[in-house]
Each structure stands twice: as structure tokens, then as C-alpha cells.
Image (cartoon, helix red, strand yellow):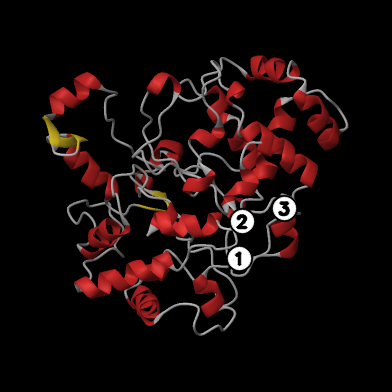
Amino acid sequence: MKRAGMAGLLVGLVLLPLAATCVAGTLGLPPLPGPAPAPALAELGRQLFFDRRLSVNGTLSCAMCHVPEQGFTVNELRTSVGMEGISLRRNAPTLLNVAYVRELFVDGRSASLEAQALMPVVHPDEMANPDLRSVMRRIASMAEYRKTFLRAFGSTTPTPQRVSAALAAFERTLLAGDSPFDRWHYAGKTKAIDERARRGYALFMAQGCAQCHPIGARDALFSDGLFHNTGVQARSDARRDSAASFTLTPGLQAHLDADALRRIGVPDLPDDGRYEVTRREADRRAFRTPSLRNVALTAPYMHDGSLATLHEVIDFYAQGGSPDDPRQDARIKPLALSADDRACLVEFLEALTSESLSPGRYRAR
């Protein structure tokens, strides 16, 4: 379903001004928290976003972990891959509608898009630059940036503040609403979604999913923006000490025990989520609630990419998460859902896919 949904987005690609959706507004989304990004600034940010030369050895760009055609995440990988192929600890979150996120990263360690933008550039496992000065010198040496910096800032000189402002401006243009659900729920188009998706919506509300993924009277971000322990990390911790099977090619599997896994890769360290930022015990294993908009495009799921499909996510919550985790949010309890109920919930979630987003307008060019 996810591939079909993205294929629909790719139909009739048009290159529009990057700030167009910000100005016009998008059905189902609230007004932007601040002014719409200036087109020249957003265009500079787009150029930087796709440029591999921002990494220390010219091999990684922002877009390699946030692929437009894959919902601005990476579908093939459970967790991202950084410098020299090192596996990172967390799944790459989508950048769609990131303009509305108050605390960035799944642990909320960054308070703004501008503050977040350059963190991967100097992270030793990501783009691995030793410092920002070397990055600015590299950008300054590239003739193609002089015009875009001049248009955006009236100066050809790159600085960390200008680069982060440009990247943040581009990311604020990544708005995706106007889904079939929005047209049904907010525009009154009764045939925009089918009966099974409507039943899935009713189940979503009745089973309490909207407690963390709220739906407002005029718009919906499908996230409360808060941090919760859903039991996912406890599940992953338990599996870390067990054997694992990998499909190498169709019909050929490898079976490795926990010791073998540690010998051939990066140690699978526990992730304490928000606790690593606040050091508050109540925040241990808590992660920011993701939006459900365009969720059909952004597999695999959860902060560690440990659930491959929406069906697996619903099964996880239906079983009550990880009930043996004493820190798990008390609102997560077993759900009495039939197989058909679960299928209807998936159809509802698929109806949250924006049909107004054209990934082609964001591609490198």
C-alpha cells in the first residue's frame, strides 16, 4: 500500500515555488507557527539539503536519510546508516510537517529547526565534520552557492547561522495535509474515504488512540507533541539478548546469536529516550509521539525501526505494548480487536496520506 500511495504522489509532478503551500494553507493543517519561509532562503536550504559535499568525505547528504520519495525517511533501513557505513541507533524520522514540532529529535534534545539543522553535520557517526568552520570554508569554495547565498542574504559569505536558517526554511516547506481523511472530515466530502476507513476512524477514537494522536475540530497534527513510554524499548531490550534470523537472499537465512551480532556490528545499546536529555527517571524510555500523517509512507516504525508494518504496530498496541515494563504509559492496555478491526485501522491510517505533496519539487536539480 505504501508504494502505491507514493506512486500516487509522483503523478503529475510540478515544480512549484517552495513556499507556495505555506502561503496558501493546507487542508487539515493549522497555520504555521511563524511566517512563511522566504522562497530564496528555502531554495538555498533545498540546495544544501541534497549536497553530499557537506559531509567530511563527500558521501552523505541530509537527503540520504530523509528521502523525498520515501516520505522523507528511509524505508529500506531499520535505523539510519552514517559515515563509513556505521549503523546509527535510531530510525530516521520523517521531516513532513516538521515545521510544527516544538522539540526536535525523538528525545526532544533540540528546541528549534535552526538548532537541529547542523547537529548531524558535525556528529562523528553522521556527516563527521570536525567543526563547522571547515564546512563553511568548503561551501565558500563552491561557486554555485554564491548566487543563492546572495539572493537569500545579500551576501555570498556562508556562516553557521545562515546555513542553519536556510536548512530550517526548506524543512518548513515540507507540508503534507489534504489527505482523503481531511477531505472527508474537514471538507465534508462523504465519498473521500470508504466505509472501512470510516470504521477504522471510529475504532481509532473508541480505543483511545486519539489520546496521544489527537484530532482537532479544524485541523489535526495527529501528535500531542509529548513524550511517552509505549513499551517499545523494553521489547527491543528483551530481543537484544536473543538470537536473530536474517534473510540473505530469497530462501537463504542466517541465524546468529546475540554474541555473534555484537561481534559483527555496532553494539546494540539500550536507548533511554527523553531521559538522556532530562535525567528525570519519569522520562526513561519515553519518546516523542510521532505524527500519523503520511504514516503509510514512512515504514519501518517506532524510534528504533523495530516494527516493519502498520499491521505490526497495531498488533503491538493490541497486545498492550510491553506490559512487563513498569514504566510503560498506563494508557496503553490490551485492545479487543478482531483481525478485521485491525485491517480497518490500517485502512484509516492509509487515508492519512497526503495527495498534494509532490516529491519531485524537492529533488536535487
Which residue is depicted at the point 59% across and 80% down? 187
Location of mark 3 (residue): 16
Residue at which label 2 appears: 175
Q: Is residue 13 left or right of residue 283?
A: right
Within 10 Å of disc 1 (Cα), the crowding (few <14, some 14-19, many 20+) is some
Q: Earlier in the sequence, mark 1 or mark 2?
A: 1
Report how far apart the C-alphas of labels 3 and 1 lie in the structure: 19 Å
Q: Position of residue 155 (x, y in %)?
A: 86, 27
Q: Are marks 3 and 1 in contact (CB under 8 Å)?
A: no
Percent position of residue 43, x then y: 73, 40
Total numbered labels placed on residues in the image: 3
Locate the C terminus by quadrant.
top right
- Residue closest to the eye, 166 or 194: 194
What residue is at 71 percent from the left and 15 percent from the top? 137
Mark number displayed over residue 29: 1
Q: Secondary structure at mark 3?
A: loop
Mark 3 / mark 1, whichever is N-terminal: 3
Report the Cα–Cα distance between label 3 and label 2: 13 Å
| Quarter of the rendering containing residue 250 | top left
What's the amino acid at mark 2? Leu
**Location of residue 45 with respect to 220 vertically, above or below:** above
Most extreme residue toward the front is 12
Q: Say which of marks 1 and 2 sits in front.
A: 2
Disc 1 residue type?
Answer: Leu
Q: In this rendering, would 145 be left or right of 294? A: right
Percent coordinates x, y for residue 197 in the rendering: 39, 75
Task: State which quarter of the image contains the N terminus.
Answer: bottom left
